[in-house]
Image (spheres, rainbow, N blue to C red):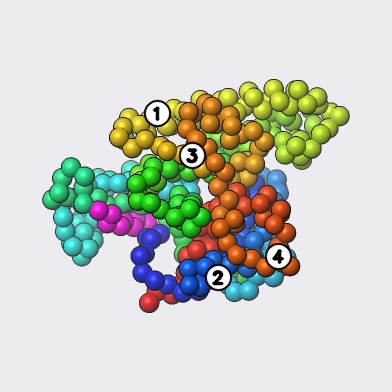
Amino acid sequence: MRRSMLRKKENLIGLDIGSHSIKMVRLKEKNGIIQLLNAGVVPTGPESLSTSKGNRQERLAKTIQKLAAHLKVKGKLIAMSISGYEVMIKKIELPMMTEEELEDRMHLELGQYIPYNIDEVEVDYQILDVAKDRPSFMEVLLVAAKKESINDYIDLARMAGFEPTVIDVDFFALGNAYEASYGLTGSENILLMDIGAAKTAMNVLHHGVPIFTRDVPIGGRQITEAIQESAGISEEAAERIKLGEPSPKIRETSVQEVFADVVSNWVSEFKRAVDFYYRNYPDNQIEKIFLSGGSSRISGLAGVFREGLGIPVEILNPLKAVNYEEKYFDPSYLDYLGPQMCIAFGLALRKNVEK
């Protein structure tokens, strides 16, 4: 999980497994130029949520294999990421010490920082900088993830015929995608919000470092379910209506009312999270929000967030920042696809060999 600053070579295949879809990206970097080689997404299917763990892993593995075959992906080394309540990210301050001293201390005192049984988690950490108000202390970014979750991802990848070289964290992958797309000036405070089907990953970057991360149980499936209940239709039909397809089963004004009701609740929940952030970081005002994820494509969502949160909002599409051969990719499709590929894109920036 550690984000090494060493140069590496050969990009890994980025694989993002969400509750609604699986995304895969392969990139090639040379002389600072990023080229897109493969990008695709496939639904996981409702059966992947309702079956037993063993059957679910098998179904997901087959879906990954089909996506890779369709994209004609070459290579077997992948980067994956974990998220949700299995991950804890915390910034702590410790007295100045060497990396070796830090490792010894962390092993001895880890229990006071992590609300889990130490034997059940994998832990990583990275020295960030000198502490702001205490020059004899340093800031350390601490990451802990449950071993069971990591092993599940490793087993799934191998079942699909791939070798997971990197297990990252969604928040870091999202930050990498933003940095590759926009760069860093070193002073901005940016809120990244990746809105998926079942949850939203919130990540505030300060000087390129995540200082506030939170998974919020909000996602596009809530809108789908509200449309489904309002119109008395199937989930698949409700999903198409959510994405803009007209239907005689429900009036357009009714759809708009459903959107307004659900999204109003979203804004209230996100505002509470932003207010909590400001209580902890009153001097680090958020300058802009970047939306990504499959549900960020909902028409008018950016405007509603801009008005409700009082912060400029933009859609994050990392595929706009890459080179590609137009004979292989339709620019309009990449424009549509890009926002939901951010985590997979950030993972595809990872490389497998340090030198």
**Mark 4 or 1, closer to the camera:** 4
Distance CA(mark 4)–CA(mark 2):
16 Å
Q: Tell me if I can see residue 154 in this picture.
A: no
Q: CA distance from mark 4 to mark 3?
A: 30 Å
Classify residue 190 by image quadrant.
top left
Disc 3 packing (10 Å; few <14; some 14–19; many ≥20): many
Q: Residue at x 21, y 59 (%)?
A: 102
* Mark toward the start of the polypeptide (1 vs 2): 2
Going by the image, does 190 lie left or right of 97? Answer: right
Q: Nearer the viewer, mark 1 or mark 2?
A: 2
Left or right: 295 in relation to 126: right
Look at discs 4 and 2 and give the one toward the viewer: 4
Q: Is residue 52 left or right of residue 147?
A: right
Tag 1 residue: 275
Q: Position of residue 207 (x, y in %)?
A: 35, 49
Query: What stretch of residues is rendered in magenta?
Result: 117-129
Three-letter amino acid code at disc 1?
A: Asp
